[in-house]
Amino acid sequence: MHLFSLIGGVGHHQGAWRRPNSRAEGATSLDYYGDIAALAERGTIDALLMADGLSLNSTHLASGCFPHIEPLTMLSALAARTSRIGLVGSVSTTFSEPYNVARQFATLDHISAGRAAWNIVTSGHGEVNFGGRPLPQHSDRYERADEYVDVVTALWNSWEPGAIVMDRANGVYADAAHVHKINHVGKHFTVEGPLNVPRSPQGRPVLVQAGSSGTGRSFAARHAEVVFTAQQTLAGCQDFYSDMKARVRAAGRDPEQVKILPGVHPLLGSTEAEALRMEDELRHLIRMDIGLAWLSKQLGGVDLSGLDPSKPVPEELLPAVETVQERRSRYEVFRQLAVEEKYSINRLIEAEVVSQGHLMMVGTPEQIADRFAKWVAEGGADGFMMLPSYLPEGLELIVDGVIPELRKRGLFRTEYTGTTLRDHLGLEPLAGPDGQ
């Protein structure tokens, strides 16, 4: 089983920062993130993920989702404070250029001695800060992303294994015959290459992707080695898992080389009653007016202000899936909760503010471990992307509670047996700079 953890701010619950003992005052500091990384590494977790955002509005300021620490800067600092845990950074293909991103992740892989991964996102907002041009359509963003990833991987491969000869006697650092231009000319990018950073320790960083729309799944099948998804049920995860593995196979790749990790929001207590009390405590920290604004955005911008919050959203108000351009796959999750599960607006607000559409698991460490084990055994997951409600204490409960339970069952490592993220994930090794 593979376990990743999302880190950022003081937790995934939008009210977590309001807890009296939260570390919100220090949540931009390296010491704070260093403590979280050390805790996760003590638990032998595969990797930490830092998400990103490229805009700011009043709901961010009120909800505690702000600030967005720039991922690659923080992960580079954390590389020096850790030795084994993987470091996954989110960078948008819509608001960046391939050459810079290839350099940044190759550098992170060097700094961390082979623990870097790129979470590829296409972004559903942020255009107001990048020239103000309208955000490209959903399908167009993925078309650009396809070419973008091809360019980045070509740049990473522009240094062959063994290109560095380090011949001091003759004054030759690298054999030019093994460092190539890529000469890419495409619809979106023209890049000559080669990269000016040598081949990195993993051969190239691990590729991660989280889109669950049809377009996103096809993209992941071509490129990703780890795929995140938001699903509410085991049946939903099983459907996604089997579909994703089939798409990977159809793309000519080995399905075993692509790990499927549903997002889960564990909320733990030493007893079930204690976990439920914590859930209730956090519920009372939700600002429902801010939650309504977030929910409106999640539902494609529909105006919810005049509706009875104790009742479901009328289906006729919800836009068709194919017309939604921002976070389409997450919209599908919330649309299903609204239409098929008949969630009231208040309950939808809780689903948004608490877990952003990911599955809530509330209970004891034993109960959470039971569910993790069941989902993996029954073909719903290769592991989980964990989104602790509050940090660092919520992650500590996972490390000291859930992970020991998984170890007792032989489902999770007791120590790191490799040094790179590829090692942790059981991915096929790629030749590094020295050809090994």
Image (cartoon, grey):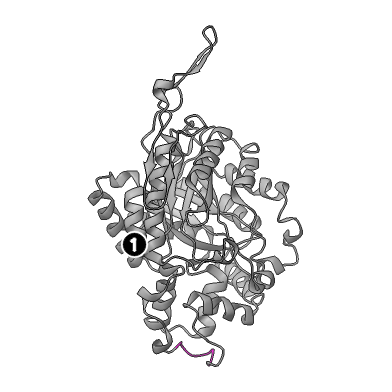
Near-viewer residue (374 or 211): 211
Q: On the image, numbered disc 1 is attached to which residue?
A: 215
The answer to which quarter of the image holds residue 112 is top right
Residue 153 as seen in the image, left or right of residue 290: left
**Residue at (50, 29) in percent of width and height:** 198
Q: Nearer the viewer, residue 157 or 193?
A: 193
Amino acid type of the residue that numbered disc 1 sits on in the rendered structure: Thr
Residue 85 showing in the rendered view: no
Residue 284 image point, x, y percent: 65, 77
Q: Residue at x 47, y 39 (%)?
A: 421
Q: Nearer the viewer, residue 376 or 408?
A: 376
From the top left corner, tell me how far across and down residue 59 is, in percent: 64, 73
Residue pictured at 71% horizontal, 67% vertical: 19
Secondary structure category for the residue under label 1: helix
Q: Is residue 142 magenta?
A: no
Which quadrant of the figure contains the C terminus?
top left
Q: Residue at x 36, y 36 (%)?
A: 428
Q: How many numbered discs?
A: 1
In the image, the segment drawn in magenta is: 308-313
Q: Quadrant of residue 274?
A: bottom right
Side of 363 where 429 appears, left or right: left
Give x and y (percent) for residue 372: 43, 57
